[in-house]
Image (spheres, grey):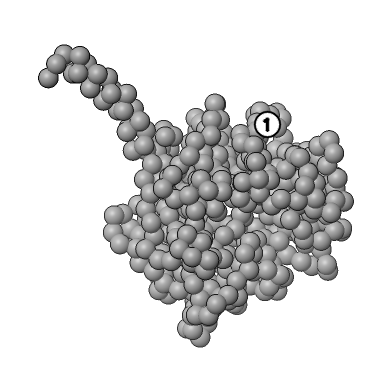
């Protein structure tokens, strides 16, 4: 081979090597079951990763058009996925009418390995399911009597604490007011109890966004408010922390609160009204919709959220922002991505102690990501452009695991589910 050809060939190989190494940071696994077209939400938590065990919950096509059942999948290591369906107390498979954005599953796994799922809640009483054995999705039965009191509940978001307990945030309509409530599963006694109504205001509706339990066992909550009644456009991005060891509720700056909070509570907001934004709007204007929450190595919160800054009513015309608590103030508010009418109601954020990441989806492209400090947007898993809704977890200090659903990838009624693992370097 001529010397100049060798040199050119070597240069090509050298230029390709970093790209190959970077792309190897992302692996995409298709879950071997179809999802229903209704398998899409912004607030949910349908994935858990614990060690080498992965758990997913999803709406699967129902027995008739416009319905779905809810399946749970469990995978240990490199083994096969094992699936089971949620069942009513009589053992009959649970089937429910589709309702995009509301009737989707949230799951958590307690310290003993029992799987907890909340599904199909849109102003409904408890629809709560728990496995009869650890890590066994075939034993998922509805357990009505396990939950405290009656509710008119929507948007359940749950996560396990380091001691094996589970915390659950919901919106409950009480006396025509949509209030925020927090519940706890005591893993030592296997009992659910209500902790508090943390947010309530007459003439306003609470929208839960995300919940995280930190390494100290404290519970961090992100939520927003709608004017008057449930509506797509919301305002007043809010944050609270429940300090489990003392039973106290605090704002980001540590101030102790008396519950329930409302929009006027000092130091509650990470995102207030901006120029031109109206609280009593008609859903065509500036506002917030959906947020993801994480904490850093010092258990300080950071929040990624969709914010529409140019008015209008397009449901995908929301920019992607990120803000963090630096110990004394909400700081470094950054616009990561400008919508151009193509950002779905899906957002996630993680923090591994040294760098933060934000994930979102773009119509026709699929999963996107950016990380600190540059916040340069990049496409992830580009072979799945139909991915439109996500959730995710920090599985380890070097790996994020993203639940990515493409709910109409097959046809108008059926789609696919992917588990995307993102290593320490973005592509």
Between 409 and 31, the one nearer to me in the picture: 409
Q: How many labels does the image show?
A: 1
Left or right, 161 with respect to 417, comes to: right
Instruction: Point out residue 52 in the picture as x, y percentages from the top left corner.
Output: 35, 52
Compared to residue 383, the image places residue 97 above or below, namely: below
Quick one: which residue is furthest to the left in this view?
1
Q: Where is residue 402 in the image (x, y as percent from the top left)?
A: 47, 49
Q: Is residue 276 visible?
A: yes
Q: Residue at x 58, y 75 (%)?
A: 66
Quarter of the image holding residue 198? bottom right
Residue at the image position 53 percent from the left and 80 percent from the top? 64
Element assignment for label 1 = strand
Q: Position of residue 72 (x, y in %)?
A: 45, 66
Name the residue at the bottom extreme.
Answer: 90
Q: Residue at x 26, y 25 (%)?
A: 13
> Residue at (18%, 18%) from the top-left corner?
6
Residue 268 in view, yes or no? no
Please tell me which residue lies in front, 241 or 263. 263
Q: Quadrant of the C terminus?
A: top left
- Lateral position of residue 274 relative to residue 152, left or right: right
In the image, 394 versus 280, the foreground residue is 280
Residue 8 against residue 56 in the figure, above or below: above
Q: Mark 1 points at which residue?
A: 333
User: Residue 102, how many percent across, how many down?
Assistant: 64, 64
The 10 Å Cα crowd at callout 1, few under 14, some 14 to 19, many 20 or more, is: some
Q: In which quarter of the image is the N terminus?
A: top left
| Side of 62 relative to 327 (left or right) | left
Asked if residue 422 is positioned above or below residue 72 in the image, the reply reads above
* Quarter occupied by residue 200: bottom right
């Amino acid at each position: 081979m001529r010397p100049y050809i060798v040199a050119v060939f070597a240069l090509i190989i050298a230029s390709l090597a970093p790209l190959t190494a970077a792309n190897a940071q992302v692996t995409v696994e298709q879950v071997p079951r179809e999802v229903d077209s209704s398998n899409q939400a912004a607030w949910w938590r349908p994935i858990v990763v614990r060690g080498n065990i992965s758990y997913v919950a999803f709406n699967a096509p129902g027995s008739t058009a416009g319905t779905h059942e809810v399946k749970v999948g469990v995978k240990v290591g490199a083994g096969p996925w094992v699936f089971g369906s949620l069942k009513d107390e009589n053992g009959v498979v649970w089937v429910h009418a589709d309702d995009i954005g509301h009737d989707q599953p949230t799951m958590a796994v307690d310290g003993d390995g029992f799987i907890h799922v909340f599904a199909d809640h849109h102003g409904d009483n408890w629809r709560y399911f728990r496995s009869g054995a650890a890590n066994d999705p075939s034993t998922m039965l509805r357990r009505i009597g396990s939950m405290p009191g009656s509710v008119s509940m929507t948007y359940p978001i749950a996560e396990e604490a380091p001691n094996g307990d589970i915390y659950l945030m919901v919106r409950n309509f009480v006396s025509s007011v949509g209030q925020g409530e927090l519940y706890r599963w005591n893993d030592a006694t296997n009992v659910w109890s209500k902790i508090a109504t943390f947010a309530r205001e007459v003439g306003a509706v609470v929208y839960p966004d995300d919940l995280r339990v930190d390494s100290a066992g404290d519970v961090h909550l992100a939520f927003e408010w709608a004017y008057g009644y449930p509506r797509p456009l919301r305002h007043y991005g809010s944050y609270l922390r429940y300090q489990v060891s003392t039973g106290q509720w605090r704002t980001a700056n540590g101030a102790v609160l008396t519950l329930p909070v409302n929009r006027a509570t000092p130091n509650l907001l990470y995102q207030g009204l901006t120029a031109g934004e109206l609280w009593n709007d008609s859903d065509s204007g500036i506002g917030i919709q959906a947020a993801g929450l994480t904490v850093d190595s010092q258990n300080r919160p950071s929040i990624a959220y969709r914010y529409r800054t140019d008015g209008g009513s397009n449901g995908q015309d929301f920019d992607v922002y990120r803000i963090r608590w630096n110990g004394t103030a909400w700081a470094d508010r950054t616009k990561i991505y400008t919508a151009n009418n193509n950002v779905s109601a899906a957002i996630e954020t993680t923090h591994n102690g040294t760098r933060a990441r934000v994930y979102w989806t773009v119509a026709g492209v699929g999963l996107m990501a950016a990380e600190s400090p540059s916040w340069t947007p990049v496409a992830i898993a580009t072979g799945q452009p139909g991915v439109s809704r996500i959730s995710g977890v920090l599985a380890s200090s070097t790996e994020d695991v993203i639940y990515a659903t493409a709910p109409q990838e097959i046809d108008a009624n059926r789609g696919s589910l992917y588990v995307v693992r993102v290593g320490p370097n973005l592509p």
